[in-house]
Image (spheres, rainbow, N blue to C red):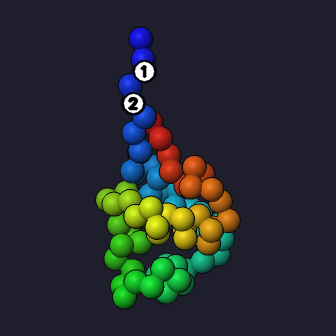
Amino acid sequence: MLAANPTINMTATGANIKALIRTRGLKVAEVQNILGFNTPQAIFKWMRGDAMPSIDNMVILAHLLDVTIDEIIIVN
């Protein structure tokens, strides 16, 4: 019997994004500027687990945080 398909735990992934940003000593405004966002709202949504970065933004975020995408995403 196959196990259930893995799903992204958005709340845990958001908390992980928040922790990784803080661990690297970055401010949300710095991440916002690097990603080219006009406001920080999307980043705050990621950190709360209300939304996930697009794959393009996930690649940039992984590079910025010096981790792999797998180290950002928390899977159930």
Is 64 situated above or below 15? Answer: below
Question: In front here: 6 or 50?
Answer: 6
Question: In front here: 30 or 59?
Answer: 59
**How far apart in space, not on screen, are marks 1 and 2 (Cα)?**
6 Å
Residue 52 point in image, percent of width and height? 38, 59
- Dividing the picture into quadrants, the one containing residue 9 is top left
Q: Quadrant of the C terminus?
A: top left
Q: Residue at x 39, y 39 (%)?
A: 7
Asked whether the viewer can see residue 63, the reply is yes
Callout 1: SS: loop
Outermost residue, front side = 56
Residue 32 point in image, percent of width and height? 46, 82
Q: Residue at x 47, y 41 (%)?
A: 75
Q: Residue at x 44, y 57 (%)?
A: 14
Q: Residue at x 39, y 30 (%)?
A: 5
Question: In front here: 22 or 41?
Answer: 41
Residue 18 point in image, percent of width and height? 51, 64
Callout 2: SS: loop
* Residue under label 1: 3
Instruction: Check disc 2: other Cα within 10 Å, few if <14, some if 14-19, many if 20+.
Output: few
Asked whether the viewer can see residue 29, the reply is no
Is 43 situated above or below 10? Answer: below
* Residue under label 2: 5
